[in-house]
Image: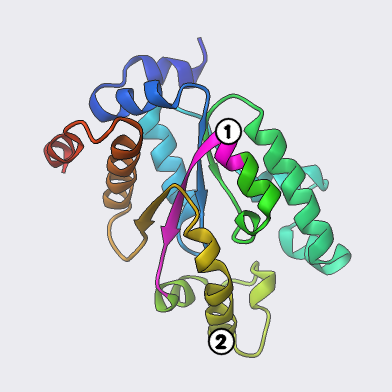
Amino acid sequence: MSEAASERSTLTGLEAAIVAALAQRSVVLVGMMGVGKTTIGRRLAARLGLPFTDADHEIEIAHAGMTISEIFADHGEPYFRDGEARVIARLLESAPGVLATGGGAFMREDTRDRIRAKAVSIWLRADADVILRRVKRRADRPLLQTEDPAATIQRLIEARYPVYELADLKVLSRDEPHERVVDECIAALHDHLCHGDSAASQLSKIQ
């Protein structure tokens, strides 16, 4: 028995109900850079007893260890987006799990269609000031290598948030303990998949 399968065998309450309702579907986290898709994704996967995968990491592996920034610099964004779409399509055909995607992945209609068919999507939404505070000191965000990162983030928000709204669920990412955000993801998944069967009352017991 795999480690993930062993963990699933010990789940109780909301988590067990969610995994049963997911069946062969995955949970896909979408949203802007810096909203915590990887951090929240790892914790959510552990709670559900499912494997976690970061799409950006898989893309770097597929390019012999090149970083996302290096792929952008050497090949350009269109090349990167095509590769990203292929990697996500492959991952969605794998065993169910929790998948964190890059900020631009959900903007492609074909990727959204695949996610809709193979997964339940959660948009981790954050305000512009939260995103800027989290990412401004990092050099691994190629889209933010501009003279005015704040303006760039605002432009990306204006372009992307209407598309992120197409996700199945929305959870606010803010400066709260990670487990609180994970709890809210669990509650949202349960409400969505299990018709809200006393999700709020069960969630209150674990807070």
Tell me the residue that label 2 is attached to: 151
In the displayed structure image, the side of residue 59 where residue 120 appears, left or right: left
Going by the numbered disc 1, the residue's amino acid type is Lys
Residue 100's place in the image compared with 17, above or below, is below
* Horizontal arrangement in the rendering, residue 185 relative to residue 141 (left or right): left
Q: Which residue is drawn at 45% across and 57% down?
A: 36
Mark 2: amino acid? Ala
**Mark 2 neighbour density, 10 Å: few (under 14) some (14–19) many (20 or more):** some
Q: Is mark 2 on a helix, strand or loop?
A: helix
Can residue 110 be seen? yes
Residue 25 in the image, given as x and y percentages of width and height: 52, 29
**In magenta segment, residue 180:** no
- Toward which corner of the image does residue 200 lie, by quadrant? top left
Mark 1 residue crowding within 10 angstroms, few (<14) / some (14–19) / many (20+) = some
Query: Is 122 displayed left or right of 109 in the figure?
Result: left
Q: Which residue lies at the image location 64% right of the left edge and 55% below the top edge?
A: 105
Query: Residue at horizontal 82%, vertical 69%?
Result: 73
Percent coordinates x, y for residue 43 in the rendering: 40, 41
CA gap between label 2 and label 1 equals 35 Å
Circle 1: element type: helix
- Residue marked by disc 1: 118
Q: What stretch is highlighted in magenta?
A: 115-127
Q: In front here: 41 or 96?
A: 96
Q: Where is residue 107 in the image (x, y as percent from the top left)?
A: 63, 59
